[in-house]
Image: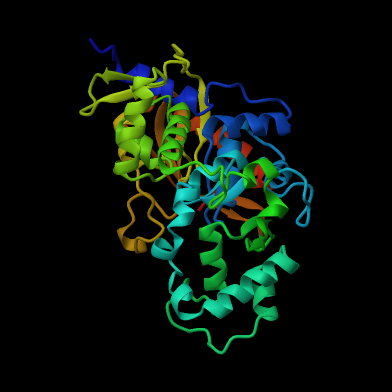
C-alpha cells in the first residue's frame, strides 16, 4: 500500500528540498553559494534585467543579501580567461542554464542531436566552411564574444534587419550551433551579458571532458536519463512524473523508464498526496519539516515556481509571466515576483530597479485572499532588503 501525504507535507518537503528551510547566513560565503547549487542543481539564465539578471535572484532568495561576485566566480573561475575550476557551467538544461560541471556529460545526448534540433542547424548544411572556421577561431583565440569572433571571420552573408531579437549574423548562428553541440562552451558572460565562447578544455576539468559527447566513456542515453532524473528528484523532494522530467526538459520516452528504474532501486518512492490528481514520487531521504519560516521574493525563473502547473498544485497559486502580454491585458504587471511567507505564496509584486534614480519602483502589489495578517509589513521589509542588496537608496510606489 502506498504511503499518503497531506498537501501541506508535500509543500514543506518541496520547500526544504529547494533550500528554503536553511537559515540565511549573516555573511554569505562561497560555501553558502555552493550549498544552493547542490540543492537546486539548475539555475535558469534569462536576459531580462528589470530587477537584476535572473541567475542572481535564486541565490538572493535563499541567502539574502550576498555578493554577486561570488556567483560570477563560481561560473567564471578567477576571471574571464581563467582555467581555474568552475563550480557552474552554462549549457542547455532546463533552458539556457547554469549547472554543476559534472552534470554536463549527462546532457551529451542533447548535444549529439544538435544537427537535427539546434535552432541554427542550417549552418551544417549550408555553411560548413564557415562553421569550421568559427570553431577553429574560438579554439585558437578564445574565450571570445560573438562580436569578437564576427570581427575575426569574414562572411559573404549580410545580417538580416528583420525579426528583432533574433537578428543574428551567420557567425553567431555558427557559434550557437557549436555551443548546442558541445563543441565549444561558455567561459562566462561579460557585463553586457554576452557569452564568452571557448574550447571546452578552457572550462571543463579533464575528468568531465573524458565523459563528454563522442568520448569513449560518455554516458549513454539510459545512464544519462537515470542520473538527470535522480538529480531532479533530489531537487524537488516530491513531484509528479511531469514535474520531474520538466526539470531537465526530458522527453517521456527517456524520463519514464528512468523514473521506473529509480523506483526499482529504492531511490524513489511512489506515494499519494491528498488533493493531487496524479501519482507523486518522493525522495525517501528528503527532509520533512513540520514548519517552514521562509520569507523571500522569487524570480519568475526560480526553480521553485518555473513549472507553473506544479506551482498551482502545491501552493494554489496561479502564476504566469506577463512580459510578452500587451500592457492593457496584463493582470498583475510586467515583471512580477511571487512573495513566499512561511510555507505559502501569499502575494506578488511588480517591481523595477530604477538605477539612475537610485530607487526600487513598486508598480503593483497583489496579496492572496488567504494572506495572513502582517503580510504587507513583511513584504515591505523584504522590499527594503532587496533595494539595499541592489544598491538602491529607497523603495517607492509608482
Which residue corresponds to the image point at 49% horizontal and 76% vertical from the top-left? 167
290 is higher (above) or lower (below) than 207:
above
Return the x and y of residue 352 as percentages of the image width and height. 54, 53
Q: How is the image coloured?
A: rainbow
| Quarter of the figure that contains the N terminus | top left
Which residue corresponds to the image point at 53% horizontal and 87% vertical from the top-left? 157
Q: Is residue 312 visible?
A: no
73 is higher (above) or lower (below) than 274:
below
> Is residue 85 toward the left or the right of residue 172 in the image?
right
Total numbered labels placed on residues in the image? 0
46 is higher (above) or lower (below) than 389:
below
Give the quadrant of residue 326: bottom left
Return the x and y of residue 186 as percentages of the image width and height. 63, 56
Return the x and y of residue 54 as percentages of the image width and height. 55, 49
Q: From the viewer's side, name the closer residue of 13 and 329.
A: 13
Return the x and y of residue 324 as percentages of the image width and height. 38, 61
Q: From the viewer's side, name the closer residue of 241 and 311.
A: 241
Q: Is residue 38 visible?
A: yes
Give the quadrant of residue 241: top left
> Is residue 48 toward the left or the right of residue 254 in the image?
right
Which residue corresponds to the image point at 35% horizontal and 27% vertical from the top-left? 261
Give the quadrant of residue 171: bottom right
Q: From the viewer's side, name the closer residue of 27 and 162.
A: 162
> Is residue 112 toward the left or the right of residue 150 in the image?
left
Q: From the viewer's side, name the closer residue of 190 and 390.
A: 190
The outermost residue toward the front is 216
197 is higher (above) or lower (below) than 331:
below
Which residue corresponds to the image point at 35% horizontal and 43% vertical from the top-left? 319
Amino acid at each position: 500500500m502506498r504511503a499518503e501525504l497531506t498537501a501541506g507535507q508535500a509543500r514543506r518537503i518541496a520547500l526544504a528540498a529547494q533550500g528554503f528551510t536553511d537559515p540565511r547566513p549573516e555573511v554569505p560565503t562561497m560555501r553558502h553559494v555552493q550549498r544552493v547549487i547542490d540543492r537546486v542543481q539548475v539555475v535558469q539564465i534569462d536576459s531580462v534585467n528589470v530587477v537584476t539578471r535572473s541567475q542572481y535572484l535564486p541565490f538572493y532568495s535563499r541567502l539574502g543579501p550576498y555578493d554577486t561576485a561570488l556567483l560570477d566566480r563560481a561560473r567564471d573561475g578567477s576571471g574571464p580567461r581563467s582555467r581555474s575550476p568552475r563550480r557552474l557551467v552554462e549549457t542547455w538544461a532546463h533552458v539556457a542554464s547554469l549547472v554543476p560541471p559534472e552534470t554536463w556529460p549527462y546532457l551529451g545526448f542533447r548535444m549529439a542531436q544538435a544537427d537535427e534540433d539546434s535552432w541554427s542547424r542550417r549552418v551544417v548544411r549550408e555553411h560548413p566552411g564557415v562553421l569550421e572556421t568559427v570553431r577553429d577561431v574560438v579554439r585558437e583565440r578564445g574565450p571570445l564574444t560573438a562580436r569578437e569572433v564576427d570581427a575575426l571571420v569574414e562572411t559573404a552573408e549580410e545580417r538580416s534587419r528583420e525579426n528583432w531579437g533574433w537578428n543574428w549574423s551567420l557567425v553567431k548562428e555558427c557559434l550557437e550551433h557549436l555551443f548546442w553541440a558541445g563543441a565549444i562552451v561558455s567561459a562566462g558572460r561579460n557585463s553586457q551579458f554576452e557569452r564568452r565562447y571557448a574550447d571546452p578544455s578552457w572550462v571543463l576539468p579533464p575528468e568531465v571532458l573524458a565523459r563528454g559527447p563522442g568520448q569513449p566513456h560518455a554516458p549513454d542515453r539510459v545512464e544519462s536519463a537515470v542520473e538527470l532524473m535522480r538529480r531532479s528528484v533530489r531537487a524537488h523532494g516530491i513531484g509528479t512524473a511531469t514535474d520531474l522530467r520538466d526539470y531537465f526538459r526530458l522527453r517521456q520516452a527517456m524520463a519514464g523508464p528512468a523514473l521506473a528504474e529509480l523506483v526499482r532501486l529504492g531511490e524513489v518512492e511512489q506515494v499519494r498526496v491528498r488533493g493531487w490528481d496524479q501519482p507523486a514520487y518522493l525522495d525517501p531521504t528528503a527532509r520533512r519539516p513540520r514548519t517552514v519560516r521562509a520569507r523571500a521574493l522569487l524570480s519568475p525563473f526560480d526553480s521553485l515556481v518555473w513549472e507553473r502547473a506544479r506551482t498551482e498544485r502545491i501552493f494554489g497559486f496561479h502564476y504566469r509571466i506577463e512580459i510578452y502580454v500587451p500592457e492593457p491585458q496584463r493582470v498583475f504587471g510586467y515583471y512580477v515576483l511571487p512573495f513566499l511567507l512561511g510555507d505559502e505564496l501569499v502575494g506578488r509584486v511588480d517591481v523595477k530597479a530604477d538605477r539612475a534614480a537610485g530607487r526600487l519602483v513598486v508598480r503593483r502589489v497583489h496579496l492572496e485572499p488567504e494572506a495572513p495578517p502582517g503580510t504587507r509589513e513583511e513584504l515591505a521589509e523584504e522590499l527594503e532588503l532587496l533595494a539595499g542588496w541592489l544598491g538602491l537608496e529607497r523603495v517607492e510606489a509608482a
